[in-house]
Amino acid sequence: MLNQVPSKQEIQKLIEENIRQILEEKALHDGELPEIGLEDRLGAELGLSSLDLAQLVATLEMHLKADPFQELVPITSIRTVADLCGAYEKFFSGDTTDQDQMDALLASKRRAEARRNNNRS
Amino acid sequence: MSTNAENRSKVVIVSGGSRGLGQALVTGCLERGYTVATFSRSESPFIKTLTQQDPEHERFLWEPVDATDPAALKAFVSRVASAYGRVDALINNAGVGIDGILPTMRTAQIEQGIDLNLKASIYLIQACSKQMLQHSSGSIINISSVNAVRGHSGVAVYSATKAALDGLTRSLARELGPKHIRVNSVAPGYFESEMVADLTPEARQRIIRRTPLGRLGTADDMAHVVLFLLSPQASFITGQTIVVDGGITC
């Protein structure tokens, strides 16, 4: 378990190790496992199911004490290994862009509703 | 053949283990050598005794937790995993009776019932399944009710929460099965508990008359089925609701 904010390299290494472990458990690949590249697609190329991804996220949560998918990043946006690494980097960087965007959208919606109400009266 | 995994004490979380069926479940799990973590709103004499017998929490842990607080449930599961290294099984037992005719029922009562009987179970399963996924095995048992499979006047919301649990059981069995996590429901019928304590002697006799096996159940009757589902003997059973009611619904 990591005790401090992990570096980009540490996150990437941890993710690759755990993907490899899941692939070994699934016995999808006999003999030597393929190299896992950052641009590899988790489903189409590496053969991970959505449940495998959930297993990966659960294991990473235990190691990193972080779950970026609860609020910060939608899990459906994760396609590649790089996307996954990016989600954790974002979590540890304190970047809350998505939340800010949602807040801005909400504020915009409220302003539009207020304008409509004013026009009616 | 004996392996380390078989010799290791299985870690079981029982929600609402302080009294009634929860007490029977905790007792049964401890008797089978399992490590048990449980929570309830308040400490009962039963819990006090077990805590005194195991002050270092080697095989028993209890904490006061409000099951309607998702963050508290998640934190409890994390503490159990930290204390014992893993979570092997979850028994979703905590629940509340929701009696009354729906048209005149208070909104607060409906919401409290759904929060405790359904939402708490969902959040607990979410937290525990994350632990189970890490070692690709586990067993989840939802305590349902005969009210989930038969209609009865005056318990519509209760029935809805329990039927929802059975739906959860079936879908999760499919969802988590590929990672060797089994999910089942046990649906108790009428058994000696606080829930039947208020029945009039006539209502009690009527139930017994309608029960093919001619008696009310006991908490142990229910616990035995749950313990079977937890055991390796049930390793090919998932997605099922097992009705334990002396035949009253057959």
Image (spheres, coloured by chain):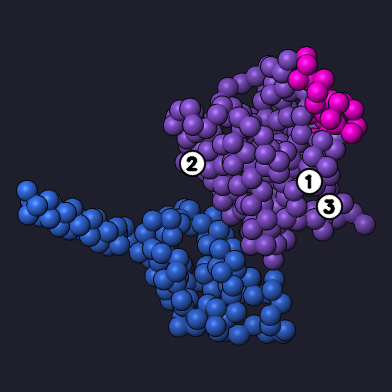
| Mark 3 lies on residue | B234
Q: Is residue B244 above or below residue A30?
A: above
Amino acid type at image mark 3: Ala
| Numbered disc 1: secondary structure | strand
Instruction: Establish whether labels 3 and 1 are both on one chain.
Output: yes
Magenta-colored stretch includes residue B132: no
Magenta region, mostly helix, strand or loop? helix
Q: Position of residue A44 (x, y in %)?
A: 55, 83
Nearer to me, A88 or B97: B97
x 68%, y 83%: residue: A29
Residue B137 x %, y %: 71, 57
The residue under label 1 is: B242
Residue B101: percent from the left, percent from the top? 55, 29
Residue located 57% across and 81% down the image: A46
Residue depicted at x 68% and y 56%: B170
Q: Is residue A57 left or right of residue B227?
A: left
Residue B148, above or below B174: above
Q: Provide the residue span drawn in magenta.
A: B201-222
Q: Marks 2 and 1: in contact by CB < 8 Å?
A: no
State which mark lies toward you, 3 or 1. Answer: 1
Q: Which chain is purple?
A: B
The amino acid at mark 1 is: Ile
- Provide the letter of the chain coloured blue: A
Question: Which image quadrant is residue A92 in?
Answer: bottom left
Q: How many marks?
A: 3
Mark-to-mark CA distance, 2 and 3 = 30 Å
Q: Is residue B96 left or right of residue B28?
A: left
- Is residue B63 something one can see in this rendering? no
Q: Which mark is residue B70?
A: 2
Q: Is residue B216 covered in magenta?
A: yes
